[in-house]
Image: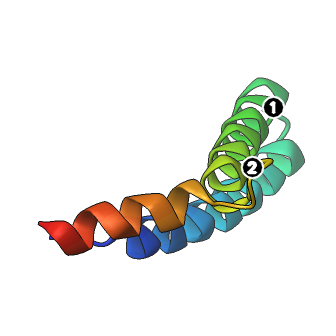
Amino acid sequence: MFSLSTVLSLLMLAIIVLLGGALLQWRRGDRRKAGLMVVLAVVAGLNIAIWTLPDSKGERPLDQAAGLEQRD
């Protein structure tokens, strides 16, 4: 239904929204929620990095997954 590139793009947008929401929560004084939103944004960013950065062989998991999608 959705390609992996689309999912990663939506995840990047979610990171931006989470950081904006964290800023608003911080200004309202709710530091705990703001901190949790930043942690979630960092975890999502690391997930994107895992999928897009090449390994020692120079291959990206995103490219490998795209190859599997084309076979189906």
Q: CB atoms at circles 2 and 1 under 8 Å apart?
A: no
Q: Nearer the viewer, residue 50 or 59?
A: 59
Amino acid at the residue labelled 1: Gly
Q: Residue at x 39, y 59 (%)?
A: 65
Q: Using the rendered view, name the quadrant where residue 51 is placed.
A: bottom right
Vertical placement of residue 68 versus 2, above or below: above
How far across and down, in percent of the image, does residue 42 sit?
A: 76, 42
Q: Nearer the viewer, residue 35 or 2?
A: 2
- Other residues around mark 2 within 10 Å, as few (<14) / some (14–19) / many (≥20): few
Total number of numbered discs in the rendering: 2
Of circles 2 and 1, the one toward us is 2
Q: Using the rendered view, name the quadrant where residue 37 is placed.
A: top right
Q: Is mark 2 on a helix, strand or loop?
A: loop
Q: Return the residue found at the far top.
A: 32
Q: What element carries label 1?
A: helix
Amino acid at the residue labelled 2: Asp
- Label 2 and label 1: CA atoms lie apart by 31 Å
How far across and down, in percent of the image, does residue 21 sit?
A: 69, 55
- The residue that disc 1 covers is 35
Q: Which residue is drawn at 58% across and 71% down?
A: 13
Q: Nearer the viewer, residue 10 or 4?
A: 4
How far across and down, in percent of the image, does residue 8 sit?
A: 51, 65
- Other residues around mark 1 within 10 Å, as few (<14) / some (14–19) / many (≥20): some
Q: Return the residue found at the far front.
A: 57
Q: Which part of the image, by quadrant, shows the C terminus?
A: bottom left
Closer to the chain start, of discs 2 and 1, is 1
Q: Residue at x 28, y 61 (%)?
A: 68
- The residue that disc 2 covers is 55
How far across and down, in percent of the image, does residue 11 sit?
A: 53, 61
Question: Is 60 left, or right, of 36 in this rendering?
Answer: left
Q: Residue at x 69, y 37 (%)?
A: 43
